[in-house]
Image (cartoon, rainbow, N blue to C red):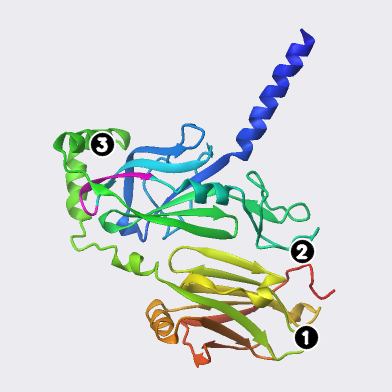
Amino acid sequence: MRALYFFILLVISCQKTNNEKLAFHVEISQPDNKYEITPVFDKIKTLEGNHAGLPYGSSSGSWGDSGSMWTEQYGTPVGADITYYSRYEDLFYHLDIDFPQDKIKDYMERAYARWDDLEAETKEYKRLGRGYEARNGENAYDSFSTLVFGFAPKGMVVVWLNFGNTRIELDRYQAKVITDKEAIAKAKEKYLQMYRISPERFEEARKELAIPDASPEEWDNYRERYHWRPVVTSENSKFRLFEVLNYTYNGEKESALRPWVLDIPYKERAVPKEMVFFWETGKAKNEKFNARVFFNWKKTNEAFKKAGNKMELQVKIAPDNNSIELLLNGQPLESDSIRIYQWEGDYKESYR
């Protein structure tokens, strides 16, 4: 009897551990508050057949980042079946999609570096599987943590996968407008009931918040990719670059640490929206720096279009650390603003 009791405890413990490894969050984002959508029926398809769904309530935040978390879901997400209401268009949409399983299985094996690996050479990612969360001094890598949906006008839906400091676009999908009267009536009834909205308020909001000319063009354009890489240099002999964070207009983000930050590979990337750099020129507090560069979409995209098929975004930090020059394949590149701060961080190869 005692053996059976311990066997049951072992099974429960294994199930709990497995569930924790398969846990993930879900976010529903939007380009702007005026483009808010509200799910009515929702289901995230999982490889294991587990029940999983979207957060309660409407979309929020910005493109690719809702700014809010929800109860953990469990399993391996392989698709979605969602009916949602776009109030500013006064339309109900249906999205029924399947993610590419080979790609999903590959990403589920990855854990991306958040900071320096103290045990070995830091890699962009390692194949550690699910359930890893970066902790200072214990683990440097983050497994898949969040499935992010972005809802734009005219049924445009983008899906991203979050891994700590890394966010990767999975694909762009197209929801269909629901035209069947019965299906519309059913969705509207559920929407009013779920969110406790009176028919009168529904009509008011439908008119007040309408955007007749709403278009997904801007966010479709953000998905344009170019073959480029950032290259950060300084003529200061003590210059040590430690990290580059790249946030792009299409909602992606990537982190590069030493050693590969010193020779970041070319790849297809979207246009940068913001880039963050960390470096040192000595061990004193006033020799540790963090800079943020903010880019203008129109000017940067036009420059990328004209620059050719293989581009270097050159970031030249002045020897005195007080200014930064931007070049694209040797030609001056204008930014919206550049801010440089003193910083008190610590990297594996920091000055001691």
Q: Is residue 172 visible?
A: yes
Q: Is most of the magenta stretch helix, strand or loop?
A: strand
Image quarter where the C terminus lies is: bottom right
* Tag in front: 1 or 2: 2
Q: Amino acid at mark 1?
A: Lys
Question: Residue 192 bears which disc, if any?
Answer: 3
SS label for mark 2: loop
Q: Nearer the viewer, residue 119 or 207?
A: 119
Name the side, left or right, on which 178 lies relative to 240: left
Residue 16 drawn at (x, y percent): 65, 30
Instruction: Magenta stretch: give its range.
Output: 88-97
Q: Is residue 89 magenta?
A: yes
Earlier-in-chain disc, 3 versus 2: 2
Q: Is residue 271 shown above or below 86?
A: below
Q: Amino acid at mark 2?
A: Glu
Q: Nearer the viewer, residue 43 or 121?
A: 121
Q: Which residue in the protein does label 2 denote?
A: 121
